[in-house]
Image (spheres, helix red, strand yellow):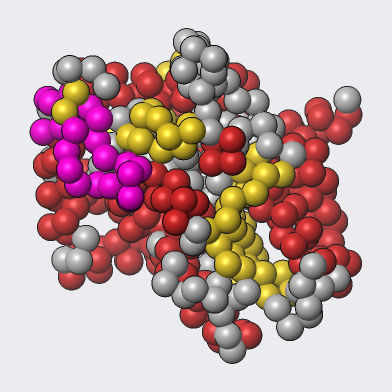
């Protein structure tokens, strides 16, 4: 931490989290934290947020029993929480709507965001189009090539997409540039962060708006099964879909919480505690103690760090974190498509792959809930090329 940075005492999950950023930027985020605390339980804010979730996002989305996949795999029942059916095709829109309503109340004239797989960028561009706010999206050049369809969607929606060619030209580098933009333009700019990462209060904000996932799934499981799931399984990159899927089960000790990292980018499983992008979490470091290169087939999981609350859930023992290889995810991508008629995002396919493994080890009376964080439209060209080779 440089001398120009200021560390606050709030925003920690055990030793993880915090805010390791310059003093001027800390003032901006302190104001953001105050505004979030002011509005998070405000009846008018909640009413507006819920209105857009219903009328624009399309919530509540279904809980689907994957009967064909369950029969083929054997063992526990597999349920899918269908975030893929949200408007824009993923869970990202839940958080975007909440943050943009905050931005409006704070008088922001401009929105910036980072994106890896492009789903957060599309969700941000979508909301900015609806609310009439200019939007700039930072995206690594490598990810732009992998997710060209999402780049076109963002531009079609009116966003300015800025290619990032520094470093590895991936998500971590896009975050670097977005943070620099915020430092330079904080007086009129709102950084709408897409995952449960970053300095305080971002991890708490993202968790709050994504917790709608587990709020719904908990009631849906009770309605369909008459009991809570044996396990909740979700893919983990930065960690927004997983923390949303876990949130309302954390106090239910009988429910196993399982985060699935890609073998090729697994900071919880293989990293060490370090400060990255203004917060402390498990991070993959190279021999020079710099953020390590990652190479997952899923652009949204290609991040050398992870949300601080996931780091805490790991060290406290409340959640388990496992790895799935790109090949295993690719096989699950095809399996779910063929058995259920549901094409998942490559990110979500990692969770599906582990759930298939886990189900085989459990009795039929158990139920596994998979958070299907997004749909695979954005990935079909990439998968086609991989399978052709």
Answer with the quarter of the image where residue 1 lies: top left
Query: Magenta part of the protein: which range?
Result: 7-27
Measured as percent of width and height from the top left, residue 316 is found at 44, 56
In the image, is residue 17 part of the stretch drawn in magenta?
A: yes
Query: Is residue 368 positioned above or below 273 on the image?
Result: below
Query: Is residue 180 positioned above or below 366 on the image?
Result: above
Answer with the quarter of the image where residue 262 lies: top right
Q: Is residue 55 left or right of residue 221?
A: left
Measured as percent of width and height from the top left, residue 15 is found at 33, 44
In the image, is residue 294 part of the stretch drawn in magenta?
A: no
Q: Residue at x 30, y 30 (%)?
A: 278
Q: Work out whether residue 297 can be spotted.
A: yes
Q: Is residue 377 left or right of residue 305?
A: right
Q: Is residue 286 left or right of residue 79?
A: left
| Quarter placement of the C terminus | top right
Query: Is residue 345 positioned above or below 340 on the image?
Result: above
């Amino acid at each position: 931490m440089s001398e120009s940075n200021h560390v606050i005492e709030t925003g920690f999950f055990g030793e993880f989290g915090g805010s390791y950023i310059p003093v001027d930027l800390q003032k901006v985020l302190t104001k953001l934290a105050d505004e979030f605390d002011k509005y998070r339980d405000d009846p008018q804010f909640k009413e507006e947020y819920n209105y857009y979730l219903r009328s624009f996002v399309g919530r509540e989305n279904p809980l689907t029993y994957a009967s064909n996949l369950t029969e083929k795999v054997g063992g526990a029942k597999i349920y899918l929480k269908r975030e893929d059916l949200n408007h824009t095709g993923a869970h990202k829109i839940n958080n975007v709507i909440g943050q943009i309503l905050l931005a409006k109340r704070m008088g922001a004239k401009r929105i910036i965001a980072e994106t890896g797989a492009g789903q957060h960028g599309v969700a941000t561009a979508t909301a900015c189009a609806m609310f009439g706010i200019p939007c700039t999206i930072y995206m690594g050049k490598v990810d732009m090539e992998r997710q060209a369809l999402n780049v076109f969607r963002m531009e079609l929606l009116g966003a300015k997409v800025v290619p990032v060619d520094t470093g590895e030209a991936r998500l971590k580098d896009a975050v670097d540039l977005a943070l620099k933009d915020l430092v330079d333009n904080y007086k009129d700019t709102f950084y709408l962060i897409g995952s449960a990462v970053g300095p305080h209060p971002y991890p708490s904000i993202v968790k709050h708006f994504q917790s709608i996932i587990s709020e719904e799934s908990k009631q849906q499981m009770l309605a369909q099964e008459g009991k809570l799931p044996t396990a909740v399984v979700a893919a983990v990159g930065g960690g927004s879909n997983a923390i949303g899927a876990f949130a309302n089960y954390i106090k239910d000790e009988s429910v196993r919480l399982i985060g699935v990292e890609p073998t090729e980018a697994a900071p919880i499983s293989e990293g060490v505690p370090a400060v990255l992008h203004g917060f402390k979490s498990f991070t993959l470091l190279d021999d020079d103690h710099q953020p390590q290169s990652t190479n997952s087939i899923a652009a949204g999981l290609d991040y050398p760090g992870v949300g601080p609350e996931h780091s805490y859930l790991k060290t406290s023992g409340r959640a388990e974190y496992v790895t799935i290889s790109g090949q295993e995810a690719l096989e699950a991508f095809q399996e779910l498509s063929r058995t259920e008629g549901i094409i998942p995002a490559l990110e979500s396919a990692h969770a599906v792959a582990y759930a298939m493994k886990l189900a085989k080890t459990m009795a039929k009376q158990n139920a596994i809930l998979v958070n299907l964080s997004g749909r695979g439209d954005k990935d079909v060209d990439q998968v086609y090329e991989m399978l052709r080779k």
